Image: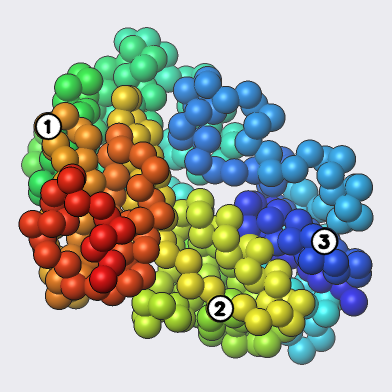
């Protein structure tokens, strides 16, 4: 048997690791479009960018690991098509590679903006580290996680930083305001609610006519899942590649993991697609086990984290689209030491801990319990979270 993994990121690398760990002794080929070894992306906007992490620390495995585990690693290789009927993948040079089982872990691409840099790849991170210097006028378009992490990095370099957009508006005014205040306190100029319409040389023009001078423009306006291979092969695609709880696509011999996987989630009873590190970390191994015929039910809750200045945050859970959650805060928003809970119908569906640690397990247990909670007790630090699960 031959297993082929298309996508040389964290999901693909962890999948091949799991195949070997589970005793699979057949041939494995891992194909990645980038020339680098498979690597993890969070350090690109955090420790690596800030110079705190060693350059080699981002790689999932060493080059020697792939050789020692008899994994054929094809970096810098583009897959141009796949034929589910013939069970082959086609490379840009015309070569065909047959497979018994196939995993698609092709990830996402940063949405481009003419005249702006993006941060998605290892090369992008190295480039930003080189060009963001003291006194540079940096304009960041987009106020999501990547945009704000880059803003924190640029301020650490002594750059003048302007952010276009409302920081983390999807968190709600109260919680989003914590992050907006954090950046203002660190010297970032915010243009909440503003929209950039053009990057013209050393100027960013906003919809209201404002012109922002810029030596460097960085866009953090989201990513697009790389689903063209799946779509052109006739697999079911809708906001990602549709997979069941086993991460199997509409073809039973093809699986999908990471950013592209739109999962029929067995716990949440809804399809979700999550573009975060933990999804790649967990779904790659789950897909590998499913490829081996093991009983898999992928029910991991979405999780992500951020580091900005002296603020560290973890978030777990999911708020169903179309619902209007209430928010309960335990702790001190002003001191930026708190846990925020999102509730729907009295049940906790998501939680965020800011500068408070070792609480992820009880938050997750609370979410999974589905218990109706008393908001006053939930807000009271004297009440153990484990006492609220019912």
- Dividing the picture into quarters, in which one does residue 367 lie? bottom left
Disc 3 and disc 2: Cα gap in Å? 20 Å
Residue 14 appears in the picture as rendered? yes
Helix, strand or loop under label 1: loop
Q: Position of residue 170 (x, y in %)?
A: 21, 55
Residue labelled with disc 3: 20
Residue labelled with disc 1: 334
Q: Position of residue 179 (x, y in %)?
A: 21, 37
User: As displayed, is residue 268 above or below residue 62?
Assistant: below
Q: Mark 3 or mark 2: which comes first in sequence?
A: 3
Helix, strand or loop under label 3: helix
User: As displayed, is residue 259 above or below residue 205?
Assistant: below
Mark 3 neighbour class, 10 Å CA radius: few under 14, some 14 to 19, many 20 or more: some
Q: Residue at x 35, y 47 (%)?
A: 359
Q: Residue at x 91, y 67 (%)?
A: 25
Residue 148 appears in the picture as rendered? no
Disc 3 and disc 1: Cα gap in Å? 49 Å
Q: Residue at x 29, y 45 (%)?
A: 353
Helix, strand or loop under label 2: loop
Q: Position of residue 311 (x, y in %)?
A: 30, 31
| Closer to the camera in the image, 299 or 104 | 299
Residue labelled with disc 2: 297
């Amino acid at each position: 048997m031959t297993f082929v993994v298309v996508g040389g990121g964290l999901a693909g690398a962890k999948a091949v690791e799991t195949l070997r760990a589970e005793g699979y002794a057949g041939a494995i080929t891992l194909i990645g479009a980038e020339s680098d070894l498979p690597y993890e992306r969070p350090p690109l906007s955090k420790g690596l960018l800030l110079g705190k992490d060693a350059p080699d620390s981002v790689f999932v495995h060493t080059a020697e690991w792939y050789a020692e585990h008899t994994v054929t690693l094809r970096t810098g290789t583009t897959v141009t098509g796949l034929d589910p009927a013939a069970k082959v993948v086609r490379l840009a040079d015309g070569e065909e590679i047959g497979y018994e089982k196939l995993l698609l872990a092709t990830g996402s691409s940063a949405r481009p903006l003419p005249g702006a840099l993006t941060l998605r790849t290892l090369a992008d991170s190295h480039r930003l580290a080189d060009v963001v210097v003291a006194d540079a006028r940096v304009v960041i378009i987009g106020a999501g996680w990547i945009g704000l992490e880059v803003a924190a990095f640029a301020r650490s370099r002594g750059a003048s930083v302007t952010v276009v957009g409302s920081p983390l508006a999807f968190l709600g005014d109260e919680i989003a305001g914590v992050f907006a205040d954090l950046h203002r306190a660190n010297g970032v100029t915010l243009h909440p609610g503003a929209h950039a319409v053009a990057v013209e040389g050393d100027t960013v023009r906003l919809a209201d006519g404002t012109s922002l001078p810029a030596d460097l423009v960085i866009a953090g306006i989201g990513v697009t899942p790389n689903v063209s291979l799946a779509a052109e092969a006739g697999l079911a695609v809708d906001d990602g590649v549709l997979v069941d709880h086993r991460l199997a696509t509409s073809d039973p011999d093809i699986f999908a993991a990471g950013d592209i996987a739109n999962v029929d989630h067995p716990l949440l009873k809804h399809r979700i697609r999550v573009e975060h590190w933990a999804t790649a970390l967990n779904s790659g191994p789950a897909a590998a086990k499913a490829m081996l015929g093991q009983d898999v039910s992928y029910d991991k809750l979405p999780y992500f984290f951020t580091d900005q200045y002296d603020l560290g945050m973890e978030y777990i859970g999911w708020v169903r689209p179309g619902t209007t959650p209430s928010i309960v805060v335990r702790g001190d928003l002003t001191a930026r030491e708190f846990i925020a809970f999102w509730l729907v119908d009295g049940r906790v569906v998501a939680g965020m801990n800011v500068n408070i640690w070792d609480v992820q397990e009880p938050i997750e247990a609370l979410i999974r319990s589905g218990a109706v909670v008393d908001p006053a007790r939930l807000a009271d630090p004297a009440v153990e979270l484990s006492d609220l699960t019912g």
